[in-house]
Amino acid sequence: MSGTSLDGIDVALIKTDGKSEVHRGPARTYAYKPDQRAMLREALAEAARLTDRRARPGNLAAVEWSLSEWHALAVQSFCEETGITASEVDVIGFHGQTAIHRPEIGLTVQLGDGALLARRTGKPVVCDMRAADVAAGGQGAPLAPAYHRALAARFAERPVAFVNIGGVANMTWIGVGDDIAAFDTGPGNALINDWCERHLGEPFDRDGALAARGVLDAKSFMTLALHPYFEKPIPKSLDRNAFDISCLEGLSPADGAATLVHFTATSIGRAAGRFAQRPKLYVICGGGRRNPRLMKEIRGLFEPLGEHVLNAEEAGFDGDAMEAEAWAYLAVRSLHGLPLTYPMTTGVARAMTGGVLVRPNAGT
């Protein structure tokens, strides 16, 4: 899994039937080097002009090849470090890098060559898992809810919500009877990371220290909070670059970071009221859970209402590995023709399977 935060490649091993049985194994994160992150940022800017999901103009083809090679190396390193042998791996779920996500025009593009990854690893690869849903009129995101529902089996408390704060934040709601709903709540780490990269030359706000020194700029916050996305009906999804933060120009680095943290937290807070019943428990996963300032604001929104907030580790999970685990889980569901998406997770008309299976000797 390579997420919209552009922090690195997450690799995780699970054993699953693609249904209720999930045994979580080891996981590792392989951080991108600055030049790799810069290459991906340039590719995302170039991809903003795409209208054909299969086109790879300019440098996109070279970036896709490099990204796939990086993933192959990550798999190799993971197996070497954990002692996993090739015979223990049945299938690889490959997310790739989302380059552009505009389901309103039927377009979603994930850079990543599944055939190349299959050849390099010698293992079957399931990739391109969003495309079928978007082609059927769905949002193509979020895709982790099916996995969140499997993990929720350990909780007696309902409704429970899984909040993934990656580059974009999303929330999965699991109700009584395992009813499921999900949508992208708004920004996650992407805006904060971009702000820190621009003003500090740092990839993220380590320990939320920059935001902790700043104060909220109410005018800029309101400009962001009035974005029309928040009034759209659920389910819905976002492109990483959906929000324009030019309204923050002129703010100090600290005040800009504080404003963006508040924007992310309140977007998540607003989302909780969009479901049939407010969650009683929130499990926070993704890189955002490592930002103490962000977590403090999220707790401040939910806990006064008597709703509990746990980070993934407090709930018994690995918050860094959860999305990579989800892609492994979805790969197995794809092999069995089981649904990956549902009407109340992506807005697709009926439950949909998806994914493309590529075998190492297939060539395509």
Image (spheres, grey):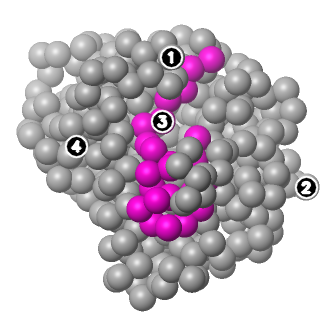
Tell me the residue at 60%/12% (across/down): 105
Q: Nearer the viewer, mark 2 or mark 4?
A: 4
Comparing labels 3 and 4, the label whose residue is closer to the camera = 3
Q: Earlier in the sequence, mark 2 or mark 3?
A: 3
Which amino acid does the dot numbered 1 rest on? Answer: Asp
Mark 4–mark 1 Cα distance, whole angstroms, equals 24 Å
Please tell me which residue lies in front, 290 or 342: 342
Give the number of marks.
4
Image position of 313 (left or right of 283): left
Quarter of the rendering containing residue 271? top right
Question: What distance separates the C-alpha of mark 2 from that of mark 1?
Answer: 40 Å
Q: Nearer the viewer, mark 2 or mark 1?
A: 1
Q: Residues within 10 Å of mark 1 (few under 14, many from 20)?
A: few
Mark with earlier residue (2, 4): 4
Residue shown at 49% from the left, 85% from the top: 85
Could you say whether the residue bearing mark 3 is in a helix, strand or loop? strand
| Disc 2 and disc 4 in contact, CB within 8 angstroms | no
In percent of width and height, residue 200 lies at 8, 39
Q: Against 31, is 65 above or below? A: above
Amino acid beneath label 4: Arg
| Residue interval drawn in magenta | 106-128
Residue with the mark numbered 3: 110
Q: Which residue is mark 2?
A: 177
Task: Tell me, yes or no, whether the highlighted magenta stretch contains residue 102.
Answer: no
Give SS at disc 1.
loop
Distance of label 2 from label 3 (alpha carbons)? 34 Å
User: Which residue is denoted by mark 4 in the rendering?
Assistant: 37
How crowded pointer 2 is (Cα within 10 Å; few <14, some 14-19, many 20+) is rated as: few
The mark that comes first in sequence, 3 or 4, is: 4
